[in-house]
Image: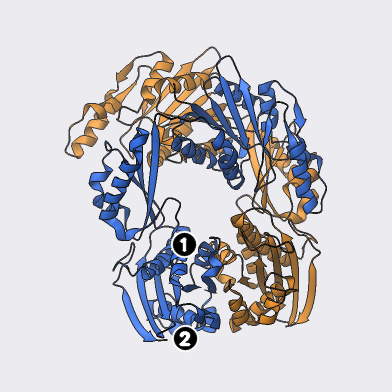
Chain colours: A blue, B orange
């Protein structure tokens, strides 16, 4: 049995001319690879009906399946339906179910179906519709039989948020199996340690001739450790498990999760498990920390909210930071002192309902995200983060302030600040705070008080 | 003379299997588009010599030039040199200058040239070497003559740090000039209107046989309208201008910017121009609106900050929303009444420094982002957004509240809510608020009061 193989085709002028970066193809390639399916080619084409048709016919000579993204919208430059029909030598017909779906969407919005929208119900006569649970463009599934082989073709819309659930729900279950050869991947997620330190700690495990293969990728403050097994399916689980054990033995305290775990989701879970809740007080991150936490469904159980004190006057008016501190050349808005005051004020201003939790945590972030605003003493990337905890039983308040010099541009600095702040809370919840975290430039300053 | 056209070929297993994201192709496509060169295709292939050879021969039928990245390293899976030689039907020879370059690098590192490294000096006999000023892999330049045409082929290494200077130094100057044919693109950005309505309003302009060609892409609440002129350079400007005029005549009030303009940046600019400032009061977006605004450098001029009142108790404690309203089955946290109260409280709690601006604006967002928490009366996607303005001279406070049913999953609903809120502020700044915006399901409720 030869290995089933596929091709990926991305459609759109905006991709061909380089205006937009195609991230769908890579994501689909990862999914296919995880299923041990071979990928012979990715191709990107402009909105050119004949070029798309030619590519479908050419790829069908070599591929058992073709995944096409884009070109399913309602406008005249959406040509995937027409190209597919041309490749199949079939007319387009209106699909009843797709039409009902489109009419239903418009009815809920109090509108009637325009001819442009109605064209999205078209499919080649032998094809079938793939439901789109998160958007308006139905997908199409067809089979193209040539002298060379039978090729399954799946057309999905371009927006990743629509494409991903359709791929997972309708394409993946329909793809061929590969029973004799397994590729299995396990991913561990770390926070707070430089990638080079991970590489040193895992040197023996990261040799390229090893199976499972261990690799790392860093994205902002998060390092992902990929353990990849390739071979006989029966040995996959035990082999992955043993390598994971060795990785955890080397850098365990920095590992916060596995697979799709994110730092905000794991932190919210740890808050829930502890019966605790949290608040944020954000300056240079401007709401990003709250946004990252509330991106997680169910965050409202344990995330109460907070303050975006971007202007100094907001820090004084709502987080009790003395105006004199902000004006003092020795203190200023970007300082350990102000970060601590912000975190403590957040706890002091917590609503009465916060008394119903075992503990209430706050994080405060103040820094210089750039590109301007830096100085010799406080260059761009200088960020102070305070994390504070009030124990509602004992009334004891503990806090810690860390001083960072974070690498990167404005966006990097903001994301890395918010991630670090969330990670500090997780470490406190786990009673496992490392003395120094990634980018930290001064010893941690810890204090205790009565709330 | 027909328009010179090219193709881009990216080589590497790590790209084909989706392990790495190819950013080279998009960058090259942008450079070619900026030179008015037409791109017929991008293709990504695994490290498979015959597949690469076949692709070179196929693309040479249609392309005047082919840019290849990757596959020039020293290892056994670097096959671009061999494929190029096979496509040219030529042997590989060792290039003296490349050999001296490679020997020099190794000597500086105190090593001698290994056979693997030495293979990087190979090139097809008729080809020439492209110097690599920042790395170790020389590039290759060749000419492939087929019955169809003469195709110039440029092979560059995969690491962007090496590829970019080689492309700029050696490829760009060697590409065909296009004095008689120009491709020029103008992009307009819209907010607040469904893509299908844009398609209907611009139906005549979006015909595929028209020049300039008009196309649309939607990303969350933003629709980008691409006007693409192709033809004689002298007519490009007037032709683009005339089509832009027609687009603006059709959907002008929804267009907020052009080119790289983003809605947050344009809104911050409009605030600055008006001498105004703004605050946010966020519930379901949890800080995302603040994060989107503060992502823009310089936002601190006009963005003061705000409140993340995710828990109801935060709404009562800090935005003066009566607890009775929140508990009332007829009102509740997700209601026009609460949104208005939040927006007005944000203005009332603005720091004294806000009196120094001409006007102070606030936006308040309360809704159900899902996936749970919806009901028959208030399904997931129900979002109320209030925008309020206090004129500091007259003391007059005006506001508007809109009721939306926003499509998509939790992340979509949050991004679209924040975008809509920012857009409402921009419309107020421009005195051009449409009566109904995308996803709006009830008439706009406007009010005026003394602050």
Circle 1 crowding by C-alpha within 10 Å: few under 14, some 14–19, many from 20: many
Residue A379 visible in the picture? no
The residue labelled by disc 1 is A264
On residue A337, which mark appears?
A: none
Residue drawn at x 34%, y 28% is B77
- For the N terminus of chain B, the quadrant is top right
What residue sits 34% from the left and 14% below the top?
A: B91
Q: At which x and y percent is residue B334?
A: 69, 69
Q: Nearer the viewer, residue B1 or B190?
A: B190
In this rendering, the answer to whether B373 lies above or below A138 is below
* Quarter of the figure with residue B241: top right
The residues bearing labels 1 and 2 have C-alpha atoms spaced at a distance of 31 Å
Question: x, y (%) of residue A209?
Answer: 26, 36
Q: Secondary structure at mark 1?
A: helix
Question: Depth-wise, is mark 1 or mark 2 nearer the camera?
Answer: 1
Nearer to the camera, B62 or A264: A264
Q: Position of residue A67 (x, y in %)?
A: 57, 33
- According to the image, label 2 marks what residue? A322
Q: Position of residue A223 (x, y in %)?
A: 37, 53
Q: In the image, are marks 1 and 2 on the same chain? A: yes
Against A408, is A183 above or below?
above
Chain to which mark 1 belongs: A
Q: Is residue A152 visible?
A: yes
Q: Is residue A440 left or right of residue A101?
A: left
| Depicted B194 relative to depicted B369: above or below | above
Q: Is residue B177 left or right of residue B130?
A: right
């Amino acid at each position: 049995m030869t290995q089933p193989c596929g091709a990926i085709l991305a459609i759109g002028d905006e991709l061909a001319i380089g205006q937009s970066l195609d991230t769908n193809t890579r994501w689909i390639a990862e999914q296919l690879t995880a299923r041990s399916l071979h990928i012979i080619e990715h191709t990107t084409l402009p909105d050119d009906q004949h070029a798309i048709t030619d590519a479908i016919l050419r790829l069908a000579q070599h591929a058992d399946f073709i995944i096409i993204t884009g070109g399913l919208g309602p406008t005249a430059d959406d040509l995937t339906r027409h190209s597919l029909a041309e490749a199949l030598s079939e007319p387009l017909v209106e699909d009843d179910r797709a039409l009902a779906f489109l009419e239903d969407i418009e009815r809920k919005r109090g509108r009637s179906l325009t001819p442009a929208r109605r064209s999205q119900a078209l499919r080649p006569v032998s094809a079938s519709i793939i439901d789109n649970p998160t958007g308006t463009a139905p997908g199409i599934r067809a089979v193209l039989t040539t002298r060379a082989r039978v090729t399954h073709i799946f057309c999905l819309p371009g927006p990743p948020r629509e494409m991903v659930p359709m791929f997972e729900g309708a394409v993946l279950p329909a793809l061929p199996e590969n029973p004799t050869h397994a590729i299995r991947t396990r991913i561990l997620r770390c926070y707070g340690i430089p990638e080079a330190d991970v590489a040193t700690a895992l040197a023996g495990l990261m040799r390229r001739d090893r199976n499972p293969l261990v690799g790392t990728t860093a994205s902002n403050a998060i390092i992902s450790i990929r353990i990849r097994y390739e071979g006989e399916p029966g040995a996959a689980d035990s082999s992955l498990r043993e390598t994971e054990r060795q990785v955890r033995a080397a850098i365990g305290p920095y590992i916060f999760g596995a697979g799709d775990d994110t730092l905000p989701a794991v932190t919210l879970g740890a808050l829930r498990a502890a019966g605790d809740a949290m608040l944020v007080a954000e300056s240079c991150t401007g709401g990003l920390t709250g946004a990252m936490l509330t991106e997680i469904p169910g965050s409202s159980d344990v995330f109460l909210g907070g303050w975006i004190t971007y202007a100094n006057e907001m820090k004084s008016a709502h987080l009790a930071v003395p105006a004199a501190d902000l004006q003092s050349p020795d203190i200023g808005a970007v300082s350990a002192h102000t970060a601590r005051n912000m975190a403590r004020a957040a706890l002091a201003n917590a609503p009465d309902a916060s008394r119903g939790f075992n503990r209430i945590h706050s994080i405060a972030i103040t820094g210089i995200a750039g590109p301007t605003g830096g100085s010799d003493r406080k260059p761009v990337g200088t960020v102070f983060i305070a994390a504070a905890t009030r124990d509602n039983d004992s009334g004891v308040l503990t806090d810690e302030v860390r001083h960072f010099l974070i690498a990167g541009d404005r966006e990097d600095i903001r994301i890395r600040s918010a991630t670090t702040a969330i990670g500090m809370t997780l470490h406190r919840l786990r009673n496992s705070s490392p003395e120094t975290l990634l980018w930290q430039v001064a010893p941690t300053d810890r204090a205790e008080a009565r709330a």
